[in-house]
Image: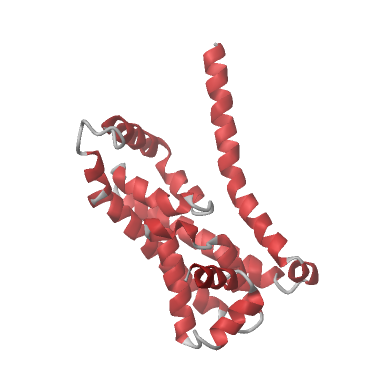
Amino acid sequence: MLQALLDFLRSLTNPDQLIRLLSTVFAGWWGYAMLFGIVFSETGLLVGFFLPGDSLLFTVGVVAGAGQLNLPAIVVTLITAALLGNSCGYFLGRYIGVRLFSNPNSRIFRREYLVRTQHFYDKHGGKTIIYAQFVPIIRTFAAFVAGVAGMGLPRFLSFNVFGSVGWVTSMTVLGYKFGSVPIVRAHFEKVIVLIIVISVLPVLFQLLKARGAAVQSAAD
């Protein structure tokens, strides 16, 4: 069972295997529905953090460039999936996640953590929603945390639109434009790893920046 799941996930980030999958098991609109469900789960359901995100979108772009998917249709489909997924995560945090912090004596979900999170999202919440859309794993939890922090729905939705549209469009179009380049196809797995590394770099930069600021503050 586990091996079958791993094989399925690998097929989502391999153009030839994804084309084969879309031509057989998930032919026609079933393919669009499958890809919609994966993006929705990865962005909206907290258990979907292990699903491919950036690599899937890039591969989808490659497959669209090969004529197996309609680029405008799949971009709209996946933008809709990301928008709804993020919104689902937000409402899970708003109405369920908050209850985790309702016990003032909880050792794990302490109210002081919630207060800190609320202050952070009050100050940086907008750009956090946008940046997080491009970062694996963090993308899965950012909207949920925004809901827990009590970010206003209109504010969340506005940044959700920018983040979702930018993420899906950029990654898919990159695959569409460069997926047919011989060197990319010859080293596709390495390209996928490079995309993931580039996605994580902004987070590492911010962590190093925050650590440097903390060290400087302590020295002062």
How many marks are shown on the rendered structure?
0
For this rendering, which residue is in front, 41 or 67? 41
Q: Position of residue 154 (x, y in %)?
A: 31, 52
Horizontal arrangement in the rendering, residue 44 relative to residue 204 (left or right):
left
Q: In what quadrant of the picture does the C terminus appear?
A: top right
* Above or below, 101 relative to 173: above
Q: Residue at x 38, y 62 (%)?
A: 85
Q: Residue at x 61, y 81 (%)?
A: 19
Colouring rule applied to residues: secondary structure
Q: Residue at x 24, y 51 (%)?
A: 96
Q: Position of residue 111 (x, y in %)?
A: 26, 33
**Residue positioned most to the right:** 183
Q: Position of residue 210 (x, y in %)?
A: 54, 29
For this rendering, which residue is in front, 120 or 1? 1
Q: Residue at x 20, y 32 (%)?
A: 104
Residue 140 picture quarter: bottom left
Horizontal arrangement in the rendering, residue 159 relative to residue 91 (left or right):
right
Residue 69 appears in view: no
* Above or below, 161 relative to 18: above
Horizontal arrangement in the rendering, residue 95 relative to residue 205 (left or right):
left
Residue 125 appears in view: yes
Residue 10 picture quarter: bottom right
For this rendering, which residue is in front, 120 or 3? 3
Q: Position of residue 42 (x, y in %)?
A: 44, 61
